[in-house]
Amino acid sequence: MKFLNVCVLGLGYIGLPTASTFATHGLRVIGVDVDRKVVDTLQNGGLHIQEPGLRTLVRAALGSGNLVVQGIPEEADVFIIAVPTPFFDDKSADMRAVVAAAEAIIPYLRPGNLVVLESTSPPRTTVDLVQPILERSGLRAGGAGPGRFMLAYSPERVLPGQILRELIQNARVIGGVDRISAEAGRDLYAIFVRGEIILTDATTAEMVKLMENTYRDVNIAIANEFARLAERFEVNVWEAIAIANRHPRVSILHPGVGVGGHCISVDPWFLVEAAPDITPLIRTARQVNDGQPKYVLALIERALGGLAGRRIAVLGLAYKPNVDDLRESPAIQVACELIAEGAFVKAFEPNKPDALVKNLNTSKTLAEALEGVELIALLVAHDELRNVTPERIAELTTARVIVDAVNALDTDVWRQAGFQVFCLGVGQNQSEVV
Ligand code: SAJ
């Protein structure tokens, strides 16, 4: 099947790279966003999100004339829905943006069109939620005959920080409401995907996406629990994990400050919420990871012998290393909880020195963050923070106590330089010996 025009609804972290990539591969693309500011920014040559290489790609797409950005959809061969699916306070999925996008397509839907949902969604969303909405057009999903349109679910699975590369290289799953829809999806994504394209049904594709992120969440939770056990039993968890991972069938992830971002900390709830009676493990893993910032807070408190009135520099605010994305960041949670406990906090995010975070005093430079503090809490293993030397820090501050929550520092080197180092997942006495 050949497609010439694509209409992408939602120009966020997934929609914008996808729309731009189709455009640079010769398709005519209408990029739609309901947020006027997003549309204005893009139309004026700006960018509302940060991702390596994205500026160049969007410029090329707009410059070619193949990508047009606007506030409402128009007729096209393909409609791609790439809108956010956050959750409500009770952890149930907020599907309002998906519903609104599907409804926005109805007036433009024509026989023979393909509609693809990319947003991470609870199981059965494509067939139980999106399909009935689209069928209000009078057309029927599945098949290629008169009065028919095709419908598929194809999850985005790209890693923030590497979106542009992974969009092309990763294997792509396409789940159709029928075979014809899945094959149409394959023909569409084959325009730029170089990884394997795997066809299945829509609900399986939804499950695949949720299973991948849930698998990672559960495995991070067990790493976090191992860190707690290691502290209790005077073991260095980082060494223990490295040794365990020499086993041919073991691959333990890293403990840390908790699980942030807008994917892994959200998606497992879609499964728990859809089937609470059979998902105790997934729920518990979420709770373990959500509890990790508090665990790191307690480590900082132990290192200082109390928090009220103490002056602390927090280094790293992003949700993971080497990105500038602050969404759902556990490091920010730690910083805010320190403040709630009465500490004075100065925070520094090297990838976003101008970051403005509610209730948080952010510093534009490392020097500014370190001045006058008593303790340094290293919460994100950015390369820039890993590479800073004890000599440099010693020049910038009189603080000689450092908490390393992410195994970023060579503790021997720092101890020799006169620092007291407290590491997540390392028994206090053990840390003196290793
Ligand atoms: N983290 C740990 N320990 C680890 C690995 C990660 O504590 O060993 C933490 C990170 O610091 C971060 C969080 O987990 O706070 C999530 O980071 P991540 O790099 O694991 O994942 P994301 O959220 O950036 O992207 C994930 C990816 N999913 C998987 O790897 C299974 C990506 O492929 C998905 O496309 C993306 O979610 C998404 O959009 O769903």
Image: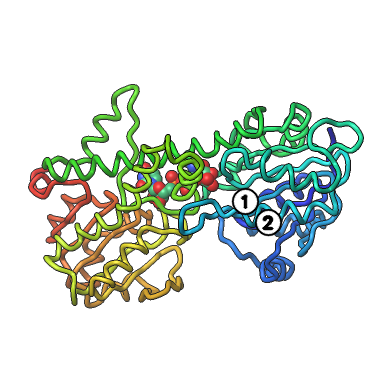
Question: Around disc 1, counting alpha carbons within 10 Å, would you say few (fewer than 14), some (14 to 19), or many (20 or more)?
Answer: many
**Which amino acid lies under the numbered mark 1 shown in the image of this protein?**
Ile
Residue 10: give its label.
2
Judge from the rendering whether residue 84 lies leftward or rightward of residue 250; answer left or right.
Answer: right
Question: Quick one: SS at disc 1?
Answer: loop
Which quadrant holds the C terminus?
A: top left
Q: Report which residue position mark 1 lands on.
A: 14
In percent of width and height, residue 204 lies at 60, 31
Label 1 beta carbon less than 8 Å to ligand 1: yes
Q: Nearer the viewer, mark 2 or mark 1?
A: 2
| 2 and 1 marks in contact (CB < 8 Å) | yes
Q: Residue at x 25, y 65 (%)?
A: 392
Between 122 and 227, the residue placed more toward the observer is 122
In percent of width and height, residue 350 lies at 40, 64
**Which amino acid lies under the numbered mark 2 shown in the image of this protein?**
Gly
Between 215 and 246, the residue placed more toward the observer is 215
- Colour scheme in use: rainbow
Task: State the image quarter where residue 419 is shown.
Answer: bottom left
In percent of width and height, residue 11 lies at 67, 57
Question: Quick one: SS at disc 2?
Answer: loop
Q: Residue at x 26, y 29 (%)?
A: 244
